[in-house]
Amino acid sequence: MRICIIGAGAIGGFLGARLAAAGNASVSAIARGATLASLQQHGWRLNTAEGQVHAPVQAAENPADLGPQDLVVIAVKGPALTAVAQTIAPLLGPETMVMPAMNGVPWWFCRQTPEFGDRPIESVDPGGVIARAIPYRQVIGCVVHASTATIEPGLVQHRMGNGLIVGEPDGGKSARAQRVADLLAQAGFDVTHSDDVRYDIWYKLWGNMTMNPVSAITGATCDRILADPLVRAFCTSAMAEAASIGERLGCTITQTAEDRCAVTARLGAFKTSMLQDVEAGRAIELDAIVGAAQEIGRRLGLPTPNIDALLGLTRLFGRVNGLYPLEP
Protein backbone atom coordinates (compact mmCIF):
# COMPACT_ATOMS: atom_id res chain seq x y z
CA MET A 1 0.00 0.00 0.00
CA ARG A 2 1.18 3.51 -0.82
CA ILE A 3 0.54 5.84 2.12
CA CYS A 4 1.21 9.56 2.35
CA ILE A 5 1.17 11.46 5.63
CA ILE A 6 0.32 15.14 5.25
CA GLY A 7 1.79 16.92 8.24
CA ALA A 8 4.72 15.16 9.88
CA GLY A 9 4.30 16.76 13.29
CA ALA A 10 3.47 15.06 16.59
CA ILE A 11 0.63 12.81 15.35
CA GLY A 12 1.77 12.54 11.74
CA GLY A 13 5.27 11.54 12.78
CA PHE A 14 3.87 9.04 15.28
CA LEU A 15 1.75 7.36 12.63
CA GLY A 16 4.28 7.63 9.82
CA ALA A 17 7.22 6.21 11.76
CA ARG A 18 5.27 3.22 13.05
CA LEU A 19 3.74 2.43 9.66
CA ALA A 20 7.04 2.74 7.82
CA ALA A 21 8.98 0.71 10.38
CA ALA A 22 6.44 -2.14 10.12
CA GLY A 23 7.49 -2.62 6.50
CA ASN A 24 4.04 -3.36 5.08
CA ALA A 25 3.64 -0.09 3.19
CA SER A 26 5.57 2.61 1.39
CA VAL A 27 5.08 5.65 3.62
CA SER A 28 5.87 9.12 2.26
CA ALA A 29 5.29 12.57 3.74
CA ILE A 30 4.27 16.07 2.73
CA ALA A 31 6.09 18.58 4.91
CA ARG A 32 7.66 22.02 4.81
CA GLY A 33 10.62 23.95 6.12
CA ALA A 34 12.74 22.47 8.89
CA THR A 35 10.51 19.38 9.19
CA LEU A 36 10.97 18.58 5.51
CA ALA A 37 14.74 19.06 5.79
CA SER A 38 14.88 16.80 8.85
CA LEU A 39 12.87 14.04 7.18
CA GLN A 40 15.02 14.17 4.07
CA GLN A 41 18.19 13.93 6.16
CA HIS A 42 17.18 11.52 8.92
CA GLY A 43 13.97 9.76 7.84
CA TRP A 44 11.14 9.04 10.25
CA ARG A 45 12.21 9.29 13.91
CA LEU A 46 10.02 8.44 16.90
CA ASN A 47 11.20 8.18 20.50
CA THR A 48 9.33 5.60 22.58
CA ALA A 49 9.80 3.95 25.97
CA GLU A 50 11.38 1.00 24.13
CA GLY A 51 13.84 3.13 22.16
CA GLN A 52 13.87 5.08 18.92
CA VAL A 53 11.85 3.95 15.91
CA HIS A 54 13.62 4.89 12.70
CA ALA A 55 12.60 4.34 9.08
CA PRO A 56 13.34 5.84 5.66
CA VAL A 57 10.88 8.24 4.03
CA GLN A 58 10.32 9.96 0.74
CA ALA A 59 9.47 13.48 1.81
CA ALA A 60 8.37 16.32 -0.44
CA GLU A 61 6.74 19.75 -0.23
CA ASN A 62 4.79 19.39 -3.47
CA PRO A 63 2.16 16.61 -3.61
CA ALA A 64 2.73 16.33 -7.36
CA ASP A 65 6.20 14.89 -6.60
CA LEU A 66 4.58 11.85 -4.95
CA GLY A 67 1.54 11.13 -7.15
CA PRO A 68 -1.61 9.13 -6.36
CA GLN A 69 -1.71 7.13 -3.12
CA ASP A 70 -3.80 4.30 -1.71
CA LEU A 71 -4.23 6.09 1.62
CA VAL A 72 -3.68 9.73 2.52
CA VAL A 73 -3.51 10.53 6.24
CA ILE A 74 -4.11 14.19 7.06
CA ALA A 75 -2.41 15.07 10.35
CA VAL A 76 -2.18 18.85 10.24
CA LYS A 77 -3.58 21.33 12.72
CA GLY A 78 -7.14 22.45 11.99
CA PRO A 79 -6.25 25.98 10.78
CA ALA A 80 -4.05 24.47 8.03
CA LEU A 81 -6.66 22.12 6.57
CA THR A 82 -8.19 24.48 4.02
CA ALA A 83 -4.79 25.10 2.46
CA VAL A 84 -4.09 21.35 2.40
CA ALA A 85 -7.38 20.68 0.62
CA GLN A 86 -6.44 23.11 -2.13
CA THR A 87 -3.22 21.20 -2.92
CA ILE A 88 -4.22 17.58 -2.26
CA ALA A 89 -5.49 16.66 -5.75
CA PRO A 90 -2.24 15.08 -7.07
CA LEU A 91 -2.35 12.52 -4.24
CA LEU A 92 -5.89 11.38 -4.99
CA GLY A 93 -6.84 8.62 -7.39
CA PRO A 94 -10.44 7.44 -7.81
CA GLU A 95 -10.06 4.85 -5.02
CA THR A 96 -7.70 6.72 -2.70
CA MET A 97 -8.85 6.69 0.91
CA VAL A 98 -8.45 9.93 2.88
CA MET A 99 -8.21 9.61 6.65
CA PRO A 100 -8.05 12.79 8.74
CA ALA A 101 -6.23 12.07 12.02
CA MET A 102 -7.07 15.39 13.63
CA ASN A 103 -8.66 16.90 16.70
CA GLY A 104 -12.29 17.92 16.89
CA VAL A 105 -15.20 17.74 14.48
CA PRO A 106 -14.21 16.85 10.89
CA TRP A 107 -15.66 18.75 7.93
CA TRP A 108 -17.80 15.79 6.84
CA PHE A 109 -19.43 15.13 10.23
CA CYS A 110 -22.91 16.55 9.54
CA ARG A 111 -23.21 15.32 5.96
CA GLN A 112 -26.13 13.06 6.93
CA THR A 113 -27.79 15.55 9.30
CA PRO A 114 -31.04 16.87 7.73
CA GLU A 115 -30.61 20.35 9.21
CA PHE A 116 -27.29 20.70 7.36
CA GLY A 117 -27.94 18.99 4.05
CA ASP A 118 -25.10 19.91 1.70
CA ARG A 119 -24.18 23.02 3.66
CA PRO A 120 -20.73 22.90 5.29
CA ILE A 121 -19.88 23.32 8.94
CA GLU A 122 -18.52 26.83 8.46
CA SER A 123 -16.35 26.64 11.59
CA VAL A 124 -14.18 23.92 10.07
CA ASP A 125 -14.88 24.27 6.34
CA PRO A 126 -15.61 27.90 5.43
CA GLY A 127 -17.40 28.01 2.12
CA GLY A 128 -17.19 24.23 1.69
CA VAL A 129 -13.67 24.33 0.18
CA ILE A 130 -12.57 21.10 1.87
CA ALA A 131 -15.72 19.16 0.97
CA ARG A 132 -15.32 20.10 -2.70
CA ALA A 133 -11.67 19.03 -2.76
CA ILE A 134 -12.02 15.71 -0.90
CA PRO A 135 -14.91 13.49 -2.07
CA TYR A 136 -17.02 12.27 0.83
CA ARG A 137 -17.08 8.71 -0.54
CA GLN A 138 -13.29 8.54 -0.18
CA VAL A 139 -13.19 9.52 3.50
CA ILE A 140 -12.35 7.11 6.33
CA GLY A 141 -13.15 8.36 9.82
CA CYS A 142 -10.46 8.22 12.50
CA VAL A 143 -10.05 8.98 16.20
CA VAL A 144 -6.60 9.12 17.79
CA HIS A 145 -6.20 8.30 21.47
CA ALA A 146 -2.52 9.07 22.06
CA SER A 147 -0.34 11.81 23.49
CA THR A 148 2.72 12.79 21.47
CA ALA A 149 4.95 15.85 21.16
CA THR A 150 7.45 17.24 18.69
CA ILE A 151 10.85 17.54 20.36
CA GLU A 152 12.40 19.19 17.32
CA PRO A 153 11.40 19.29 13.64
CA GLY A 154 11.11 15.71 12.42
CA LEU A 155 11.59 14.09 15.85
CA VAL A 156 8.51 12.96 17.80
CA GLN A 157 8.18 11.77 21.39
CA HIS A 158 5.45 9.27 22.24
CA ARG A 159 4.14 9.95 25.75
CA MET A 160 1.09 7.79 26.35
CA GLY A 161 -1.77 6.06 24.59
CA ASN A 162 -1.71 3.88 21.52
CA GLY A 163 -5.35 3.72 20.44
CA LEU A 164 -6.79 4.34 17.00
CA ILE A 165 -10.43 4.02 15.95
CA VAL A 166 -11.30 3.83 12.26
CA GLY A 167 -14.59 3.47 10.47
CA GLU A 168 -16.90 4.48 7.66
CA PRO A 169 -18.47 7.95 7.99
CA ASP A 170 -21.91 6.50 7.15
CA GLY A 171 -21.54 3.77 9.77
CA GLY A 172 -21.25 0.03 9.41
CA LYS A 173 -18.08 -1.87 8.58
CA SER A 174 -16.35 -2.27 5.24
CA ALA A 175 -13.55 -4.18 3.62
CA ARG A 176 -11.57 -1.03 2.93
CA ALA A 177 -11.80 0.22 6.52
CA GLN A 178 -10.78 -3.25 7.70
CA ARG A 179 -7.78 -3.09 5.39
CA VAL A 180 -6.71 0.18 7.03
CA ALA A 181 -7.36 -1.24 10.51
CA ASP A 182 -5.26 -4.33 9.76
CA LEU A 183 -2.38 -2.24 8.46
CA LEU A 184 -2.41 -0.06 11.57
CA ALA A 185 -2.60 -3.09 13.84
CA GLN A 186 0.42 -4.61 12.08
CA ALA A 187 2.27 -1.39 12.88
CA GLY A 188 1.64 -1.90 16.59
CA PHE A 189 -1.38 0.30 17.21
CA ASP A 190 -4.36 -0.76 19.34
CA VAL A 191 -6.99 -0.50 16.62
CA THR A 192 -10.77 -0.62 16.75
CA HIS A 193 -12.78 -0.96 13.54
CA SER A 194 -15.89 0.90 14.62
CA ASP A 195 -19.34 0.57 13.10
CA ASP A 196 -20.21 4.07 14.39
CA VAL A 197 -17.14 6.27 14.10
CA ARG A 198 -19.27 9.44 14.33
CA TYR A 199 -20.18 8.46 17.88
CA ASP A 200 -16.50 7.83 18.69
CA ILE A 201 -15.57 11.27 17.35
CA TRP A 202 -18.30 12.99 19.34
CA TYR A 203 -17.46 11.06 22.50
CA LYS A 204 -13.84 12.19 22.34
CA LEU A 205 -14.93 15.76 21.67
CA TRP A 206 -17.34 15.63 24.62
CA GLY A 207 -14.45 14.64 26.85
CA ASN A 208 -11.86 17.17 25.69
CA MET A 209 -13.96 20.11 24.47
CA THR A 210 -13.67 21.82 27.87
CA MET A 211 -10.26 20.68 29.07
CA ASN A 212 -8.47 22.00 25.98
CA PRO A 213 -9.66 25.62 25.99
CA VAL A 214 -9.80 26.00 29.78
CA SER A 215 -6.20 24.80 30.02
CA ALA A 216 -5.22 27.17 27.21
CA ILE A 217 -6.60 30.31 28.83
CA THR A 218 -5.52 29.44 32.38
CA GLY A 219 -2.24 27.59 31.80
CA ALA A 220 -3.47 24.88 34.17
CA THR A 221 -3.00 21.16 33.78
CA CYS A 222 -6.09 18.95 33.89
CA ASP A 223 -5.66 17.98 37.55
CA ARG A 224 -5.82 21.62 38.64
CA ILE A 225 -8.81 22.36 36.43
CA LEU A 226 -10.79 19.49 37.90
CA ALA A 227 -9.71 20.30 41.47
CA ASP A 228 -11.42 23.71 41.32
CA PRO A 229 -15.12 23.14 42.09
CA LEU A 230 -16.34 26.22 40.21
CA VAL A 231 -14.34 25.46 37.08
CA ARG A 232 -15.31 21.80 37.22
CA ALA A 233 -19.00 22.74 37.47
CA PHE A 234 -18.65 25.04 34.47
CA CYS A 235 -16.99 22.25 32.47
CA THR A 236 -19.69 19.71 33.32
CA SER A 237 -22.40 22.22 32.36
CA ALA A 238 -20.78 22.70 28.93
CA MET A 239 -20.49 18.92 28.60
CA ALA A 240 -24.21 18.57 29.29
CA GLU A 241 -24.90 20.92 26.38
CA ALA A 242 -22.58 18.91 24.12
CA ALA A 243 -24.32 15.71 25.17
CA SER A 244 -27.68 17.18 24.14
CA ILE A 245 -26.26 18.10 20.75
CA GLY A 246 -24.84 14.60 20.37
CA GLU A 247 -28.23 13.05 21.13
CA ARG A 248 -29.82 15.08 18.31
CA LEU A 249 -27.02 13.91 15.99
CA GLY A 250 -27.56 10.24 16.83
CA CYS A 251 -24.44 10.16 19.02
CA THR A 252 -26.08 9.58 22.40
CA ILE A 253 -23.64 9.52 25.32
CA THR A 254 -24.74 7.47 28.31
CA GLN A 255 -21.76 8.19 30.57
CA THR A 256 -22.19 11.07 33.05
CA ALA A 257 -19.99 14.15 32.86
CA GLU A 258 -18.74 13.48 36.39
CA ASP A 259 -17.71 9.95 35.47
CA ARG A 260 -15.83 11.30 32.44
CA CYS A 261 -14.09 13.89 34.59
CA ALA A 262 -13.02 11.12 36.94
CA VAL A 263 -11.36 9.35 34.00
CA THR A 264 -9.56 12.55 33.02
CA ALA A 265 -8.46 13.12 36.61
CA ARG A 266 -6.59 9.81 36.57
CA LEU A 267 -4.24 11.29 33.95
CA GLY A 268 -2.83 13.55 36.65
CA ALA A 269 -0.93 16.73 35.70
CA PHE A 270 -1.70 16.33 32.00
CA LYS A 271 -1.10 19.12 29.48
CA THR A 272 -3.72 19.24 26.76
CA SER A 273 -2.74 19.67 23.12
CA MET A 274 -4.16 23.20 23.13
CA LEU A 275 -2.07 24.19 26.15
CA GLN A 276 0.99 22.77 24.41
CA ASP A 277 0.16 24.89 21.36
CA VAL A 278 -0.17 28.03 23.50
CA GLU A 279 3.17 27.38 25.20
CA ALA A 280 4.82 26.86 21.79
CA GLY A 281 3.22 29.99 20.31
CA ARG A 282 1.21 27.99 17.76
CA ALA A 283 -2.29 28.80 16.53
CA ILE A 284 -4.95 27.11 18.66
CA GLU A 285 -7.39 24.57 17.18
CA LEU A 286 -10.42 26.30 18.64
CA ASP A 287 -12.79 26.11 15.68
CA ALA A 288 -12.84 22.33 15.27
CA ILE A 289 -13.06 21.68 19.01
CA VAL A 290 -15.40 24.37 20.37
CA GLY A 291 -16.54 26.47 17.42
CA ALA A 292 -18.00 23.49 15.59
CA ALA A 293 -19.93 22.30 18.65
CA GLN A 294 -21.36 25.79 19.14
CA GLU A 295 -22.29 26.11 15.46
CA ILE A 296 -23.95 22.69 15.32
CA GLY A 297 -25.96 23.45 18.44
CA ARG A 298 -27.10 26.77 17.04
CA ARG A 299 -28.15 25.23 13.72
CA LEU A 300 -30.08 22.53 15.57
CA GLY A 301 -31.83 25.17 17.65
CA LEU A 302 -30.30 24.03 20.95
CA PRO A 303 -29.19 26.51 23.66
CA THR A 304 -25.47 26.46 24.45
CA PRO A 305 -24.77 29.29 26.92
CA ASN A 306 -21.78 27.59 28.54
CA ILE A 307 -20.23 26.54 25.22
CA ASP A 308 -20.84 30.10 23.98
CA ALA A 309 -18.93 31.51 26.97
CA LEU A 310 -16.12 29.01 26.52
CA LEU A 311 -15.78 29.89 22.83
CA GLY A 312 -15.91 33.63 23.43
CA LEU A 313 -13.35 33.66 26.23
CA THR A 314 -10.89 31.38 24.43
CA ARG A 315 -11.30 33.21 21.12
CA LEU A 316 -10.56 36.53 22.83
CA PHE A 317 -7.54 35.02 24.59
CA GLY A 318 -6.28 33.69 21.25
CA ARG A 319 -6.73 37.03 19.48
CA VAL A 320 -5.01 39.01 22.24
CA ASN A 321 -2.05 36.64 22.12
CA GLY A 322 -1.84 36.29 18.33
CA LEU A 323 -2.93 32.63 18.37
CA TYR A 324 -6.32 33.01 16.64
CA PRO A 325 -7.32 35.15 13.63
CA LEU A 326 -8.57 38.66 14.26
CA GLU A 327 -12.11 39.52 13.27
CA PRO A 328 -12.45 40.27 9.52
Image (cartoon, rainbow, N blue to C red):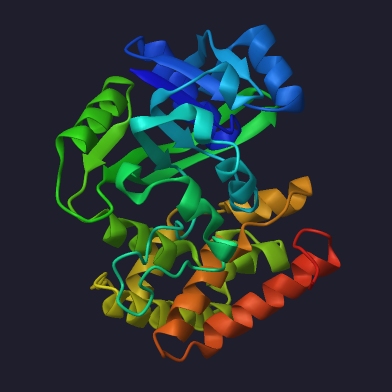
Q: Residue at x 33, y 74 (%)?
A: 246
Q: Quadrant of the C terminus?
A: bottom right
Total numbered labels placed on residues in the image:
0
x and y, in percent, of residue 28 in the image: 51, 18
Figure quadrant of residue 218: bottom right
Q: Is residue 54 above or below residue 92?
A: above
x and y, in percent, of residue 195 in the image: 17, 51
Q: Quadrant of the N terminus?
A: top left
Q: Nearer the viewer, residue 87 or 181?
A: 87
Q: Is residue 202 above or below residue 190?
A: below
Figure quadrant of residue 123: bottom right
x and y, in percent, of residue 235 in the image: 51, 77
Residue 223 seen: no
Q: Residue at x 45, y 76 (%)?
A: 296
Q: Nearer the viewer, residue 106 or 49?
A: 106
Q: Is residue 157 above or below residue 43?
A: below
Residue 114 relative to residue 9: left or right: left
Residue 309 seen: yes
Residue 6 relative to residue 167: left or right: right
Residue 19 relative to residue 41: left or right: left
x and y, in percent, of residue 165 in the image: 30, 44
Q: Residue at x 76, y 65 (%)?
A: 318
